[in-house]
Amino acid sequence: MDSLVSRLKRYGYIRSAAVEKAMLKVDRALFVPEGAKTYAYNDHPLEIGYGQTISAPHMVAIMLELLEIGEKDRVLEIGTGSGYNAALMATMAKEVYTVESIPELAEIAKKNLSDFKNVNVIVGDGSLGYEEKAPYDTICVTCAAPALPETLKTQVKEGGRIVIPVGSLYIQTLYRFIKRKSSFEKSAHGEVVFVPMRGKYGF
Ligand code: SAH
């Protein structure tokens, strides 16, 4: 695990001490299925069942750096999957709310996350966000969306960040949106491939 993290740092994916600390703290092996444990420290995505994947560690690092999570942040994640990214964010933030639409995966994630007391796994359509605890300082979307859902725009605080892959079913661009007074500052961060977002604002 330590050598994976030092490689991600050397290649420039990990840029901050905060992301490095989180990635050293959370063991990815705890979040991958039994048969895939030996590949936990390889830098590629892995199947987690139900047609879904845990992202490659470098992709997780890129997103965490863009999110600029602060200690006092309330974070929303769309797409809990294995719970790995939620665990990382939980070590950096005050509290994490993570929405998963496949109930069986949410159950697995809850077990994987039992040591992380500041994470709440919610079963539902995350394309609607999670109004109950809005507004959020940071929103991380780990499934591909056709566009930035309006719901997420209203659920982020001014100065808050949304990181989301937007595009087609086959390829997307990773965007960061920062909410300003009356608009969003948008920047692009490379081409990516994520599993599709389902639900009202999904594909
Ligand atoms: N962050 C995860 C990887 C997620 S893969 C990890 O660290 O392991 C993307 C996940 O998004 C899948 O589990 C998929 O079921 C979920 N998903 C897709 N559409 C969704 C929606 N509308 N609401 C909530 N989750 C969704």
Image (cartoon, rainbow, N blue to C red):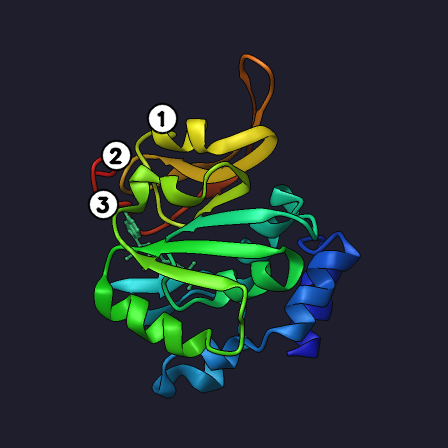
Can residue 95 be seen here? The reply is yes
Q: Name the residue under label 1.
A: 150
> Which residue is at a point 53% across and 66% down the rendered structure image?
87
How far is mark 1 from mark 2, CA to CA? 9 Å
Residue 152 higher or lower than 96, as above or below: above
Which quadrant of the figure contains the N terminus? bottom right
Disc 3 C-beta below 8 A from ligand 1: yes
Q: Mark 2 points at which residue?
A: 201
Please state which amino acid type lies under the numbered disc 1.
Answer: Glu
Residue 192 horizontal/vertical position (percent)? 44, 45
Disc 2 C-beta below 8 A from ligand 1: yes
Q: Which of 36 and 68 is in front in this view?
A: 68
Residue 83 horizontal/vertical position (percent)? 43, 66
Task: Describe the element under mark 3 as helix, strand or loop.
Answer: loop
N-terminal of the pair, mark 1 or mark 2, is 1
Task: Look at discs 3 and 1 and give the one toward the viewer.
Answer: 1
Can residue 50 be seen here? The reply is no
